[in-house]
Image (spheres, rainbow, N blue to C red):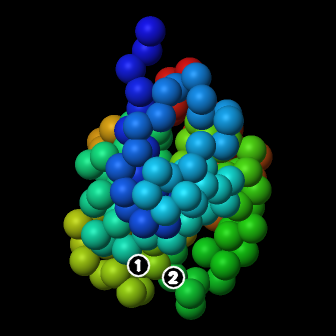
């Protein structure tokens, strides 16, 4: 028997335990009943990012972006398409570096858009520059253990 995975709710940040065999069954949060895997990127701030990095057992791909960045805005729908394709095996989130400048400094972000893949709280890989959905899926697949 496999141990349950710890999943932080993207809506209320409650920590949930979900059997790995039930990830495809659209599990919901025990506290707020929101979907744990919404299939679309969810917004993070500095505190939420810390909670997800500390408590999530599913890989997390974060798009570090800013509203004034044209390549960031053009990549947003591609990032959402990739999220729909890869959920529930990878969770997708967005963090506005303009609003949360401490995060940019913490992760030494020099340019955006920048995606960073985390697994169990550790940075696995990062990629700068706009990508289409297929490129995002291929890039993540190279770095996530099957």
Residue 38 location, x and y as percent? 64, 56
Q: Element type at marker 2?
A: loop
Specify which label sits upstream in the sequence, 2 or 1.
2
Let me know if residue 115 appears in the view: no
Closer to us: 102 or 17: 17
Work out how far the residue at label 2 is from the one at label 1, CA to CA, in angstroms: 6 Å
Q: Name the residue at 57% across, 50% down.
A: 28
Q: Is residue 54 above or below residue 31?
A: above
Residue 9 location, x and y as percent? 45, 56
Q: Element type at marker 1?
A: loop
Closer to us: 78 or 10: 10
Image side of residue 20 versus residue 17, left or right? right
Q: Is residue 24 above or below residue 113?
A: above
Q: Which residue is mark 2?
A: 66
Numbered tag placed on residue 129 in the rendering = none
CB-based contact (under 8 Å), mark 2 and mark 1: yes
Residue lying at the far top of the rendered structure: 1
Numbered tag placed on residue 97 in the rendering = 1
Q: Name the residue at 40% across, 51% down.
A: 8
| The N terminus: image quadrant | top left
């Amino acid at each position: 028997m496999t141990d349950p995975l710890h999943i932080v709710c993207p809506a209320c940040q409650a920590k949930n335990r979900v059997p790995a065999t039930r990830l495809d069954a659209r599990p919901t949060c025990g506290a707020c009943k929101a979907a744990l895997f919404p299939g679309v990127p969810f917004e993070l701030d500095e505190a939420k990012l810390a909670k997800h990095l500390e408590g999530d057992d599913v890989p997390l791909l974060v798009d570090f972006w800013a509203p004034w960045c044209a390549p960031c805005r053009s990549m947003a729908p591609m990032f959402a398409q990739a999220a729909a394709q890869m959920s529930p095996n990878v969770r997708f989130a967005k963090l506005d570096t303009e609003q949360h400048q401490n995060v940019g400094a913490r992760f030494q972000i020099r340019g955006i858009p920048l995606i960073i893949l985390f697994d169990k709280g550790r940075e696995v890989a990062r990629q700068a520059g706009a990508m289409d959905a297929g490129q995002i899926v291929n890039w993540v697949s190279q770095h996530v253990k099957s």
